[in-house]
């Protein structure tokens, strides 16, 4: 699990220290203080560049840099602690990435990028367009740099050079605020659980939200695989018919199963959930985090969501929860993070302090 992060010159952050992290971390703050940027920084540090490009690839290279200043490199450094007995292909607990604009592009790299662009365009590309390429160099920072790779901006989109390479160090999954996971993707994730004899773990957690659920399986009534559930009716029904709340919770749980022994990032976690179900929801999320051994980072704008999370973990007598708030310092606009231990958050809620 992550124990700390240091972020420099990335999107909303000139310099941000992130510490006092727990298994479950809830992040709030005013608009435009970098809640989503923090999730994206963690996604990058976990090595999931493809997911980042899927979400932000059309925004261009300049949008990565604080105040669009590409002259100052981005640094994302993190401390990550393996659980006892956990095996990893990357047996280290501290690493980071430096992202900078490549001032001089070698002839070999330029030719490789040109071939990739022409392959995608299925035609020859004008030399002037290739000449104006923006290429970013990403260097992993450990005691000795372990890998270096490149990405380029072409016609407003960012792409990795040689997209078939594998980069992910930490299993990770991100759900954007307005993103709805497709039925196909949910079905594929559930099928993977079933093949590994782990689907019961998912169902046990989901039953906390709706006890009617007896079993589930994947069917393909048309061309798209769909999860069907048995809730005691004459026939199975698609899980999507049980409402947005169940569908949202199932998507989150399946994302957690996909990122076992890793990290899950959820933007605006309360979306689609009624406030009266939030405390129960947090109990389910905590159970799933333990079941799949994941660390969760989630953002919210909801006071009800913050209170419900605190109450759910207080009933569990658990120290596995931290609430963090991002604040912009009025003098210079720099953003800082304040973390609330459980007792501190409890006192703030009792006194009706504004903690969002």
Image (cartoon, grey):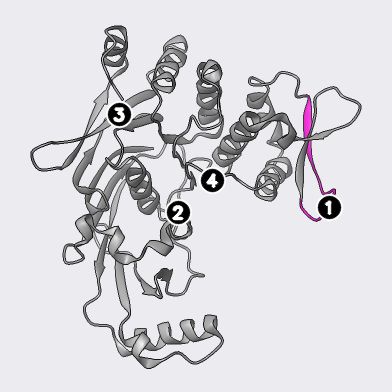
Q: Which residue is mark 4?
A: 179
Label 3 packing within 10 angstroms: few (<14), some (14-19), many (20+): many
Q: Which residues are magenta?
A: 214-224
Q: Position of residue 334 (x, y in %)?
A: 15, 42
Q: Quadrant of the N terminus?
A: top left
Q: Nearer the viewer, mark 4 or mark 2?
A: 4
Q: Earlier in the sequence, mark 3 or mark 4?
A: 4
Q: Is residue 338 above or below residue 42?
A: above
Q: CA distance from mark 4 to mark 1?
A: 23 Å
Residue 222 is tagged as 1
Q: Earlier in the sequence, mark 1 or mark 2?
A: 2
Tag 1, which secondary structure?
loop
Residue positioned 25% across, 62% down in the render = 144
Figure label count: 4
Residues under numbered marks 3 and 1 in contact, where contact means CB atoms less than 8 Å apart:
no
Q: CA distance from mark 1 to mark 2?
A: 40 Å
Tag 3, which secondary structure?
strand
The stretch drawn in magenta includes residue 299: no
Question: Which of 258/27 is in front?
Answer: 27
Q: Which residue is mark 3?
A: 324
Residue positioned 71% across, 18% down in the render = 211
């Amino acid at each position: 699990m992550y124990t700390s992060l240091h972020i420099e010159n990335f999107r909303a952050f000139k310099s941000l220290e992130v510490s006092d992290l727990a298994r479950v971390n809830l992040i709030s703050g005013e608009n435009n203080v970098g809640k989503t940027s923090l999730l994206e920084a963690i996604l990058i540090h976990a090595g999931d560049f493809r997911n980042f490009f899927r979400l932000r690839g059309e925004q261009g290279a300049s949008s990565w840099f604080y105040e669009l200043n590409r002259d100052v490199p981005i640094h994302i450094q993190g401390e990550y602690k393996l659980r006892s007995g956990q095996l990893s292909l990357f047996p280290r607990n501290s690493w980071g990435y430096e992202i900078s604009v490549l001032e001089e592009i070698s002839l070999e790299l330029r030719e490789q990028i040109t071939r990739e662009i022409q392959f995608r365009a299925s035609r020859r590309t004008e030399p002037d367009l290739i000449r104006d390429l923006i290429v970013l160099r990403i260097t992993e920072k450990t005691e000795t740099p372990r890998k270096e790779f490149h990405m380029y901006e072409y016609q407003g989109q960012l792409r990795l050079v040689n997209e078939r390479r594998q980069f992910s160090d930490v299993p990770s999954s991100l759900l954007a605020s307005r993103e709805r996971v497709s039925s196909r993707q949910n079905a594929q994730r559930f099928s993977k659980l079933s093949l590994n004899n782990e689907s019961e773990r998912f169902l046990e957690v989901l039953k906390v939200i709706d006890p009617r659920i007896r079993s589930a399986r994947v069917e393909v009534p048309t061309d798209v695989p769909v999860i069907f559930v048995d809730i005691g009716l004459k026939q199975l029904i698609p899980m999507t018919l049980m409402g947005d709340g169940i569908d949202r919770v199932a998507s989150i749980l399946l994302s957690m199963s996909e990122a076992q022994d890793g990290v899950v990032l959820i933007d605006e976690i309360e979306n689609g959930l009624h406030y009266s179900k939030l405390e129960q929801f947090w109990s389910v999320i905590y159970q799933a985090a333990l079941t799949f051994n994941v660390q969760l980072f989630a953002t919210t704008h909801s006071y009800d969501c913050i209170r419900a999370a605190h109450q759910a973990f207080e009933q569990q007598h658990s120290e596995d929860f931290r609430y963090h708030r991002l604040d912009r310092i009025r003098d210079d606009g720099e953003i800082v993070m304040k973390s609330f231990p459980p007792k501190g958050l409890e006192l703030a809620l009792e006194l009706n302090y504004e903690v969002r």
